[in-house]
């Protein structure tokens, strides 16, 4: 009976339907059977009141009726709860309220790739089910690269991670999708999730339909879309004159990137991705590797033009640490400048930056890998007409010795900024 879950109105509608049905039948048969039934019931009730006084039989009948009504409703709700929540760890009303709240959430479009994007989605799905993740398909390393070369399928790795992040059974599904076969000439090194998506794509005809079918099977919240269905190959020109081709080779080259591009030079965007950007309430760029996860999506003309033309809040999530061989020595404004250079003008309204640096122990570990905190050059960022959103959204993984964005803190701060901007 709580407000907002759209149950009471339908119960009342059903009751009204029963009453109208009875009245319609009564009118149709000219009330004769109804009058006889009323007389019969009246005689029974009159006999009962002679046997049991009305001040006793009335309350007993009333209480029995109320008991049957409530007992029937409780059993009905219990049956529905068991069907929707077999584990029994949540009440039906909580499930309905959550579903209603999430369905009313803003239409959020995220653009990126790598582990950064899937980590963001884990947090965002707690605030809205209207999420669309637009994912790069430029990966050419590992299991994804092998499937791309041997079968000709678009690399499924980043898409796999995003699907797992948006699923209700996220932890179990992530473990399943990340499982890598350790034996067999053909299977060795492949992840189950990549093979699952490859099989789905072969069955349905292409990766887009394969992802849609997988989303139904996995009951994910939101959508995951490749930015293009074209086989895209990244290339980079380095400051020392070298030309490097292939996403996995760019980072290995270890030079300063002067220009990033792709072949073919103007790949067509997926129409569903363009539609999502046009209907978005909020666009989030990143987090992820600047040149190999974020910018590859912006190399697709229709994607970057749709983002540039969107009249909604747009924010870029800056990485916490620099990436060796890709963003060595980069500041926050350097990240923004690289994005704006590809787009031809300012892309985002704001940039979210981690407030506090990692601990000394973590800084030493990163220094050994030639990685350092991304320097916040506040004045340069503000001079680029970009708002600065400072927040503590970092978590430190003691086991791996690495830092990353905390998915829940990140999502909460992103929605907080969106709420402030949207209300203004």
Image: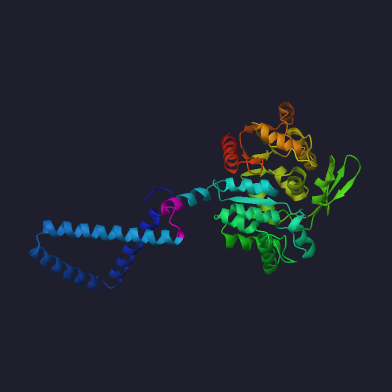
Direction top: furthest residue: 379
**Front in this rendered view, residue 80 or 59:** 80
| Residue 36 drawn at (x, y percent) | 19, 72
**Which stretch appears magenta?**
84-96
**Residue 59 appearing in the image:** yes
Decide whether residue 85 is among the magenta residues.
yes
Rendered position, 113 above or below 211? above
The answer to which quarter of the image holds residue 347 is: top right
Decide whether residue 144 is among the magenta residues.
no
Label tally: 0
Residue 380 is left or right of residue 312, and the answer is right
Residue 177 is left or right of residue 383, and the answer is left
- Tell me what residue is drawn at x 74 percent, y 58 percent: 144
Instruction: Give the colour scheme of this rendering.
Output: rainbow
**Front in this rendered view, residue 282 or 178:** 178
| Residue 402 drawn at (x, y percent) | 67, 41
| Residue 80 drawn at (x, y percent) | 41, 60
Direction left: furthest residue: 50
Q: Quadrant of the C terminus?
A: top right
**Residue 321 appearing in the image:** no
- Tell me what residue is drawn at x 76 percent, y 53 percent: 139
**Front in this rendered view, residue 167 or 340:** 167
Rendered position, 333 above or below 50? above
| Residue 395 drawn at (x, y percent) | 61, 39
- Tell me what residue is drawn at x 41 percent, y 53 percent: 91
Residue 303 is left or right of residue 262, and the answer is left
Direction right: furthest residue: 241
Rendered position, 360 above or below 113? above
């Amino acid at each position: 009976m709580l407000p907002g879950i759209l149950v009471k109105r339908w119960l009342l509608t059903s009751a009204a339907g029963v009453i109208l049905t009875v009245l319609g039948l009564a009118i149709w048969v000219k009330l004769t059977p109804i009058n006889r039934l009323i007389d019969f019931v009246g005689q029974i009730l009159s006999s009962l009141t002679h046997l049991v006084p009305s001040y006793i039989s009335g309350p007993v009948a009333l209480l029995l009726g109320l008991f049957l009504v409530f007992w029937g409703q409780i059993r009905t709700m219990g049956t529905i709860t068991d069907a929707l929540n077999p584990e029994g760890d949540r009440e039906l009303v909580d499930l309905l309220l959550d579903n209603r709240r999430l369905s009313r959430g803003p239409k959020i479009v995220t653009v990126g790739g790598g582990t950064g994007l899937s980590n963001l989605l884990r947090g965002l799905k707690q605030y809205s089910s209207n999420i669309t993740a637009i994912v790069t398909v430029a990966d050419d390393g590992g299991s994804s690269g092998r499937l791309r070369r041997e079968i000709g399928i678009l690399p499924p790795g980043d898409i796999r991670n995003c699907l797992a992040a948006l699923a209700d059974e996220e932890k179990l599904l992530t473990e399943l999708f990340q499982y890598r076969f350790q034996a067999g000439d053909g299977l060795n090194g492949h992840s189950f999730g990549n093979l699952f998506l490859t099989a789905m794509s072969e069955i349905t005809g292409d990766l887009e339909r394969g992802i849609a079918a997988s989303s139904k099977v996995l009951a994910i919240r939101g959508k995951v879309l490749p930015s293009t269905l074209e086989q895209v190959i990244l290339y980079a020109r380095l400051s020392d004159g070298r030309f490097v081709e292939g996403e996995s080779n760019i980072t290995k080259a270890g030079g300063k990137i002067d220009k990033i591009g792709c072949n073919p030079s103007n790949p067509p965007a997926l129409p569903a991705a363009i539609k999502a950007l046009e209907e978005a309430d909020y666009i989030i760029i990143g987090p992820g590797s600047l040149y190999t996860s974020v910018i590859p999506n912006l190399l697709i003309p229709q994607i970057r033009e749709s983002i540039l033309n969107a009249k909604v809040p747009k924010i870029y999530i800056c990485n916490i640490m620099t990436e060796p061989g890709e963003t060595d020595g980069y500041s926050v404004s350097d990240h923004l400048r690289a994005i704006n250079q590809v787009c031809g003008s300012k892309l985002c309204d704001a940039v979210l930056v981690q407030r506090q640096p990692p601990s000394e122990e973590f800084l030493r570990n990163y220094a050994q890998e030639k990685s350092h905190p991304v320097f916040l050059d506040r004045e340069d960022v503000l001079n680029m007409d970009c708002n600065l959103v400072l927040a503590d959204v970092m978590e430190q993984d003691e086991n791996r010795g690495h830092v990353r964005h905390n998915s829940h803190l990140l999502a909460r701060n992103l929605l907080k900024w969106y709420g402030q901007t949207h209300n203004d």
